[in-house]
Amino acid sequence: MSGSNNSGLGAVSVYTPKTLTEMINTKAKNPDAVIFGGGTYLMSRDGFYPDIKPRDIILTSHVAELSRVYHSDKYVDVGCAVTLETLLGTGSYIISRPLDNALRSLASSSIRAQMTLGGALCTDTIRFSLPCYLSAIGAEVEVRFFASRGRSGRVRTSSRWLSVPKLYGDNGEYALSANAILTRLRIPSQEGLKQFYKTIGSPMHESTSSVIFALTFNDSKGVITDASLRVALPVAGFFSSTDFDSTLSGITLPMRTAQINKLGDRLAFELKSSFPKATGIQVERAKRLLQTILFDLNTDYLEF
């Protein structure tokens, strides 16, 4: 293919497209090929390395459009091949301190320098912390959809911006079809936003007991507004409920103990109802995280 290289690795071909158009055309002609970013997830999967299964690989690292960072007053646009470490450096003026601290706690600097944003969002059957945290602040992803048309095999594309939860199915699995590629991530400013992030356990090694939790909201004179609660259970589900967010929004501080306990019980009920694979310890951890944050908010409000 013009402008790209491919090398044999056993029965596997490795493509290195230079442009997004070239990458999409390559994927359209090789629908089973694996999009490969930093490899921090894929390289740890059984059967991928060193005994790579016979699936072609398309590298994103040479595609300039996917490595760009664009700043505006209200958001930062980053290509999906940008690493987490690069985001924390170039997006420092718009990434809040709580989010910066939470993202830095996810991995060592060497892993962050390898881990791409697109790769962290597109893991197939497991959810990690990044999509949960970014979803809570209203981040969106640009997705390019493509299809071959006519005898000429010409590839036509369209693009759409999706909220992060739209990438996943009912059980939290990656739900976009093979003819879709994530290209950009738009992260809005978090100015004035109160944020709470917590990952308990290791999503990779303790997937049935770990919990990823994010809660953001605005505080308007003791009234919670624009609340956004996200809970990721790595292999069980991704919780995002507009009804629950609406319930949290409008709450006046300080809250009664009975009200906090009721909200914790409701979250536990919704997690158990929505995600059959959720374990008891995950449900209890998520419930207690919410209750602890709300009790702490009460304390802070009363002290102030």
Image (tube, rainbow, N blue to C red):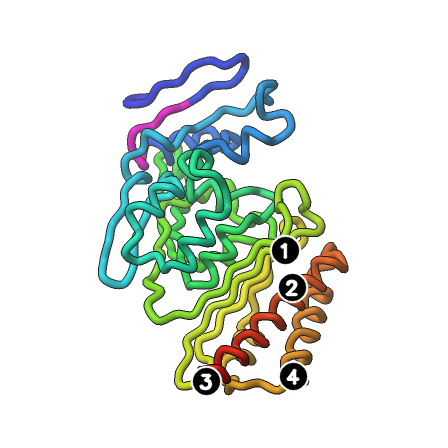
Distance, label 3 to label 1, CA atoms, is: 27 Å
Are the residues tagged 1 and 2 within 8 Å (C-beta)?
Answer: yes
Q: Nearer the viewer, residue 111 or 59?
A: 111
Q: Quadrant of residue 3?
A: top left
Distance, label 1 to label 2, CA atoms, is: 7 Å
Residues packed near mark 3 inside 10 Å, few (<14), some (14 to 19) or many (20 plus): some
> Where is 298 relative to 99, above or below?
below
Find residue 174 and report its horizontal and vertical position in percent: 56, 48
Q: Amino acid at mark 2?
A: Ala
Label 2, on which residue?
286
Label 4, on which residue?
257
The magenta segment: 15-21
Give whichever of discs 4 and 3 has the lower sequence position. 3
Q: Marks 4 and 1: which is nearer the front?
A: 4
Are the residues tagged 4 and 1 within 8 Å (C-beta)?
Answer: no
Can you tell which mark lies on residue 42?
none
Q: Under tag 3, what secondary structure?
A: strand
Q: Nearer the viewer, residue 81 or 221?
A: 221
Find residue 257 and report its horizontal and vertical position in percent: 65, 83
Q: Under tag 4, what secondary structure?
A: helix
Distance, label 3 to label 2, CA atoms, is: 23 Å
Label 1, on which residue?
211
Q: Residue at x 61, y 70 (%)?
A: 292
- Determine the residue located farthest toward the right in the rendered image: 280
Q: Marks 2 and 4: which is nearer the front?
A: 4
Q: Residue at x 54, y 12 (%)?
A: 10
Residues packed near mark 2 inside 10 Å, few (<14), some (14 to 19) or many (20 plus): many
Q: Amino acid at mark 1?
A: Val
Q: Amino acid at mark 4?
A: Thr
> Where is 105 relative to 280, above or below?
above
Residues packed near mark 1 inside 10 Å, few (<14), some (14 to 19) or many (20 plus): many
